[in-house]
Amino acid sequence: MMKKHDNSLFQIGEVTKILGVTRKALLVYENMGLLTPAVKDETNGFRYYSADNMTQIRSIRSLQALGLSLKEVAEYYYDTENMDKLLDKLYELRKMLDRNIQMLQVRSAKQGDFTVHKTVLPRQVCFCREYRCKDVAEAAIKLRDTYIAAARTGKMSMADRMKELPKPCGC
């Protein structure tokens, strides 16, 4: 078990800021068995999360954004008997998204319109480290260390990134 003061662990407030998720959501994930903090101090109830926990939270949020309920997210991770039902649902979601994309493409295309539109992408911060690894296990450790270092910079905050989005240029 990791020590709670381990520099590779994040307090619940840090996780909420970095990932843009509420404390209440994290506790719901925990109560549903979707998330287990790396360390939970039984004396004061403090929770500490690892980089792996943060990856799990992002995955849960992604599945929710696709339209899965938390019950379905739990089935996605833990139910090995009803996977066909969940696969069917995800395939249906993909078909629906493809249809909506096609409809928008048709609506956006104007006959004879060959205008080039300028697009401004949001400013991004990239974290790069170069390392050579003898095996996949070592690479996973190095990747986790890079994620932790990036998260500690404060530049991964979803709230801060949303503030930085450029305004439409009106071209």
Image (cartoon, rainbow, N blue to C red):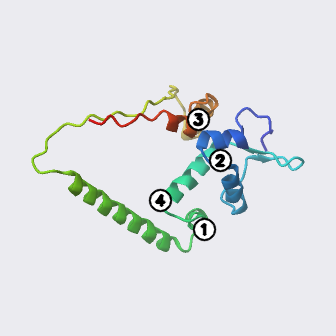
The secondary structure type at the circle numbered 1 is: helix
Label 1 to label 3: alpha-carbon separation: 29 Å
Q: Amino acid at mark 1?
A: Lys
Q: Are marks 1 and 4 in contact (CB under 8 Å)?
A: no
Q: Which residue is mark 2?
A: 53
Q: Which residue is mark 1?
A: 71
Q: Amino acid at mark 2?
A: Asn
Q: Earlier in the sequence, mark 1 or mark 3?
A: 1
* Mark 4 or 2, closer to the camera: 4
Q: Earlier in the sequence, mark 1 or mark 4?
A: 4
The secondary structure type at the circle numbered 2 is: helix
Residue ID at (16%, 39%): 115
Q: Earlier in the sequence, mark 4 or mark 2?
A: 2
* Mark 2 or 1, closer to the camera: 1
Residue ID at (51%, 35%): 163
Question: Badge 2: how crowded within 10 Å, few (<14), some, or many (20+)?
Answer: some
Say which quarter of the image contains residue 89: bottom left
Image coords of residue 60 (percent x, y): 57, 55
Label 2 to label 1: alpha-carbon separation: 19 Å
Label 4 to label 2: alpha-carbon separation: 20 Å
Q: How many marks?
A: 4
